[in-house]
Image: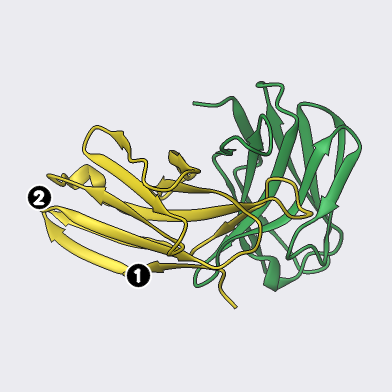
Amino acid sequence: DAGITQSPRHKVTETGTPVTLRCHQTENHRYMYWYRQDPGHGLRLIHYSYGVKDTDKGEVSDGYSVSRSKTEDFLLTLESATSSQTSVYFCAISESTTYEQYFGPGTRLTVT
Amino acid sequence: EDKVVQSPLSLVVHEGDTVTLNCSYEVTNFRSLLWYKQEKKAPTFLFMLTSSGIEKKSGRLSSILDKKELFSILNITATQTGDSAVYLCAVVTTGSTLGRLYFGRGTQLTVWP
């Protein structure tokens, strides 16, 4: 298995609170991605990174921000969590854009 | 609108059956198509297909891509209960989002003993 961990694995938070999810990799891969998975929608890209301090938006980026200060860490922040952000969040890594992506174990986030 | 469409959405078979899962896509600047298996946890990588007509095979699983007709199939022969999972198809484009995956909604396969 690719060396990807996500923390926390489960979180329950209240509407309006800030939340930060962490993705950590030990593979030294350049590309990192955050997806959310919801019933009826499949996996959708939130943000991605193509290097340290290089990030860009995916298709569902509203309400989310990211940061990547080290190759191994990619943080996803919900500035003010809403119930619509209740989801399972997956981090993925890739050696290059032509290679397959490997997924972390996921974080189940519930916003009440 | 969906760029990647998988069918059927769900499938129930008995052990030993052979199944074919379908994935059709409509994207510009196609680069590759990937298949993943998801069993109530993270998706795990199965195959990457970039060229038409070349079958990828791993044990009882095989897949092929048709770039002219814009689809791929995933075959599983002699199914086992451990094959029960959601199978995801994803397409990579060479557009502005580097290496972005467009996922289909998946096919839920249930294999009964």
Which residue bears the numbered disc 1?
A: B9
**Chain of the residue under label 1:** B
Q: Which mark is residue A105?
A: none
Is B64 drawn above or below residue A45 in the view shown? above
Q: Which residue is mark 2?
A: B15
Q: Position of residue B34 (x, y in %)?
A: 48, 47
Q: Quadrant of residue A102?
A: top right
Structural crowding at the residue carrying mark 2, measured as other residues with C-alpha within 10 Å and reported as few (<14), some (14–19) or many (≥20): some
Q: Is residue B94 left or right of residue A81?
A: left
Instruction: Please indicate whether residue B97 sits to the left or right of residue B79 in the image.
Output: right
- Percent position of residue A90, x then y: 61, 48
Residue ID at (70%, 30%): A24
Q: What's the amino acid at mark 1?
A: Leu
Hue of chain B? Answer: yellow
Distance between mark 1 and mark 2 Cα atoms: 19 Å
Q: Position of residue B85 (x, y in %)?
A: 32, 52
